[in-house]
Amino acid sequence: MSKYQVNEKGYYGTFGGAYIPEMLYPNVEELKEQYLTIINEPKFKEEFNQLLKDYVGRPSPLYHAKRLSEKYGANIFLKREDLNHTGAHKINNTIGQILLAERLGKKRIIAETGAGQHGVATATVCALKGLECVVYMGAIDIERQAPNVARMKMMGATVVPATSGSKTLKDATNEALRDWINNPVDTHYIIGSVVGPHPYPDMVARFQSIISEETKKQLVGKIGKENPDYVLACVGGGSNAAGMFYHYLDEENVKLIAVEAAGHGVDSGESAATTILGKEGVLHGSRSILMQTEDGQVIEPYSISAGLDYPGIGPQHAWLFKSGRALYGNATDAEAMEAGLLLTKLEGIIPAIESAHALAYLEKMDLKNSDSVVVCLSGRGDKDLANYMTYFGF
Ligand SMILES: *Cc1c(COP(=O)(O)O)cnc(C)c1O
């Protein structure tokens, strides 16, 4: 067993665990007892792989970006999660969890969402399976993210506004947890990243591990070997990075780089660079690293990209950071926006602003001509067009 994977107690080194209110214990315990058995069943794997192929459109291509490679003087490959159905990697996880929920006999799915991307991915698989779907979303986010609210409603989901507190993501999370406590038997809670109590981080990482599984095979056809010199991915909670790193964790000669959002700069007070600004503590049911005040209150993060605007990182990332297995870098709003525009001009690919943070880190690397680099292009930029327009004045 890899020292970078979860142990039988639900920990990655000193991080992880299940710090939950007693009333949630039965729900989480049921998952913990069953998830490995279910997801390793041949029938489960068969249906998961079939849907990834025919519904999501996998395998996603590994694209050799020639002009970007010339610019940085290295061999750069993009893992094209942006080409997945619904435009990002999130669907890999929601497909896995809906199949699991079905096998657990659940009839009702709940989720929380910030900007709406995880809500849309969840509503999508509920439509696919004909399951009832309730998405909790901060009242302010509902106003700000009208197109995603419309998408969820079109797919038959009920979008419930969270009207307490700051009326944003953390309030929506509280509402979703309250719902789950009240409906432990018939409801599954789909978490969208490698966060939350054990077994969620491990379960989500396993569903996303298809990213590095495919990459290894695809690289053999391109460079004659499975391992590149560098693997890069952006980190909000860390699910695309966890999937991109998964099959490389024990290949110690592969350098893993996770890129956090620095917002207006790590010292600006408006940032989401958790490993620099954070301390160890408990967030959303697991022990990890999070941005917090002296007395442990969560500090509001900031990033131009909604998907990276999160005050923590998943427990596996905290461990990869602390053990030194992966390097945690960061990119500011401005660096990410420029990198997004650069990819668009050089390759004709408009990346999600989240993914553009990973691309921005290429500027900060000392690459050699012989280096091969894989960057996880976690999503497409269509959803970010208004942001690009405002920023560059198009
Ligand atoms: C949600 C999202 C992210 C951030 O989530 P992780 O769990 O950190 O991967 C990154 N990129 C895109 C395109 C997203 O939609």
Image (cartoon, helix red, strand yellow):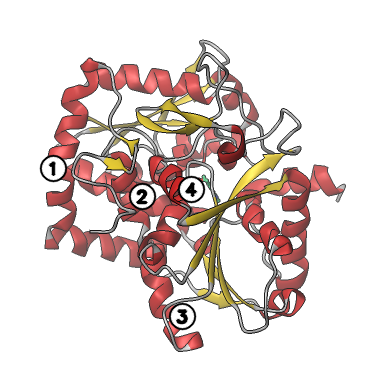
Which mark is in front, 2 or 3?
A: 3
**Structural crowding at the residue carrying mark 2, measured as other residues with C-alpha within 10 Å and reported as few (<14), some (14–19) or many (≥20):** many
Residue ID for mark 2 = 93
Residue ID for mark 3 = 219
Q: Is residue 137 above or below residue 227?
A: above
Cβ atoms under marks 1 and 4 closer than 8 Å: no
**CA distance separating discs 1 and 2:** 17 Å
Cβ atoms under marks 4 and 2 closer than 8 Å: no
Relative horizontal placement of residue 12, taking residue 141 as reference (left or right)? left
Q: Where's residue 304, x and y in %?
A: 69, 39
Q: Where's residue 325, x and y in %?
A: 45, 57
Q: Earlier in the sequence, mark 1 or mark 2?
A: 1
Which mark is in front, 1 or 2?
A: 1
Q: Earlier in the sequence, mark 3 or mark 4?
A: 3
Q: Where's residue 371, x and y in %?
A: 60, 79
**Structural crowding at the residue carrying mark 3, measured as other residues with C-alpha within 10 Å and reported as few (<14), some (14–19) or many (≥20):** many
Residue ID for mark 1 = 34
Give residue 197's mark.
none
Amino acid type indicated by mark 2: Asn
Asked which secondary structure carries label 2, the reply is: helix
